[in-house]
Amino acid sequence: MKSYKIGILKGDGIGPEIVDEGIKVIKKLALLNGFEIEFVDEKIGGDAIDTYGVPITDETLDVLGSCDAILMGSVGDPKYDQMTPELRPEKALLKMRKTLGLFANIRPAKLYEALKAHSPLKPSIINGELDICVVRELNGGIYFGKQVESEDGQSASDEMAYSVPEVKRIAKIAFEMAMTRNKKVTSVDKANVLSSSRLWRRTVIEISKDFPEVTLEHLYVDNAAMQLIINPMQFDVILTSNLFGDILSDEMSVLTGSIGLLPSASINESKLGLYEPIHGSAPSIAGQNIANPIATVLSVAMMFRYSLDLHDCADQIESAVLKVLNAGHRTADLASNDQKALSTSEIGDLITEAL
C-alpha cells in the first residue's frame, strides 16, 4: 500500500481548527482510495516561540524536508508584535521558504456560481466564470533583499533584487500552468521605474519563446491592481514578483466573496510543497469554531495535485466543496442575516461526507 508522509504545522490563532478539518479530509480520502498517511506534527510561529523560544527550529526544518508535503494553518498574534523582528512568528515563513527552496507560490481564485452574490463586483463586470491563478515568485525580491536602517532611526532601505535564473524558473512555472488553462500569461512589473522589473520583463519575454501557444502581455502593477477591479475577466495566469504578488493576490481574494475560500501552494523544484490558506491567524475568532475551513480544504486538494500526483483525489475534494456550497451551506463569513451559519467543524464534516 502506498504511503505518504505529511508534515502538519497548525500554528497560531485559528490554525489548529482549520487544519483539523483538512486532516479529516485527508484521512477520508486515504480510506476511500487505499493509501496510508503518516502525519508528523511540528510547531511554527507563536506556537514554536512559546515552546522553543524561536519561530521555527532547525530540527523542524529537517523533518519538514523529509516529508512528501506540508499542510499549514497560520502564524501570528498581536502579543508577539513587540518582539525583535528576527523572532516574530512571520519570520518562520521566510526561513522555511528559503531553507526548503519553496520558490513558486500558486494562488488560484475562483468565484463559484453559488457565491456570486458575495462578490463586491457588479454582475455586469463578472459576466462569466472568474477563474484566475497568480504565480508569485517567493524566494527573492524585496522580502529577501538587504535591509538597512540608520543608527538614528531616521532612514531605512530595502533592496529589491532579482537574478535571471530566479525569474526564469518562476516564469516557466507560469507558462506551464497557462498551457493547462486558457493559454494566457499576464506578467506584472514596474519596468518603467525599477531596474529589477526591466530584468524581469526581458527574462519573461525570453522564456515565452518556448511557449508559442501562450499569449503574453505585460502590465505595470498599478494598472494590474485597477484592472482586477474593473475587468477581472481578462486574466488567466498572472505572473509576478514577491512583493507585487503578495499584494495582488490578497486584492484578488476579495473578488471571490471571502478570503476564507482561497488556498495556496508553495513548491520547490522537487515538488515538495507547503499548502496553506492565504488568510491570517485571525486571533479575534480563535477557539470559537466559526472560521471558514474551505481554503484549507482546497489547499489539501492542491497538495494532492501538485506534490502527491493524486489528481483524482484533488478532483474529489473540489467536487465535494462545490456540492456543499451548492447545497447552501455557509460559515459565518458567507451566511446572510436570515441564514444559520454553520461551524468550522460542521462544514468540514459536510465536505467529508460529500466525498
Image (cartoon, rainbow, N blue to C red):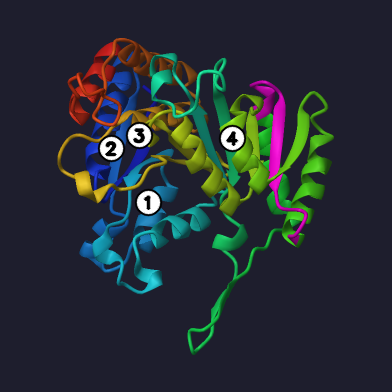
Separation (CA) of disc 3 from disc 2: 13 Å
In space, the residues marked 1 and 4 are separated at their CA atoms by 39 Å
Q: Which residue is mark 2?
A: 19
Q: Position of residue 87 (x, y in %)?
A: 35, 69
- Name the element at disc 4: helix
Which of disc 4 and disc 2 is earlier in sequence? Answer: 2
**Most distant residue in the left direction:** 288
Closer-to-camera residue (136/186): 186
Q: Earlier in the sequence, mark 1 or mark 4?
A: 1
Which one is in front in this view, the residue at disc 2 or the one at disc 4? 4
Q: Are marks 3 and 1 in contact (CB under 8 Å)?
A: no
Which residue is identified by label 3? 260
Structural distance between the alpha carbons of marks 2 and 4: 30 Å
Residue that carries the numbered disc 1 in the rendered image: 63
Q: Going from the N terminus, do you reach mark 2 or mark 1 first?
A: 2
Q: Which residues are magenta?
A: 177-194
* Front position in the image: 233 or 72: 233
Looking at the rendering, in which quadrant would you find the N terminus? top left
Residue found 53% across the figure and 48% down from its top: 247
The residue positioned 66% from the left and 35% from the top of the image is: 174
Q: Which residue is mark 4?
A: 228
Few, some or many residues within 10 Å of mark 4 (<14, 14–19, 20+)? some
Specify the quadrant that holds the C terminus: top left
The amino acid beneath tag 3 is Gly
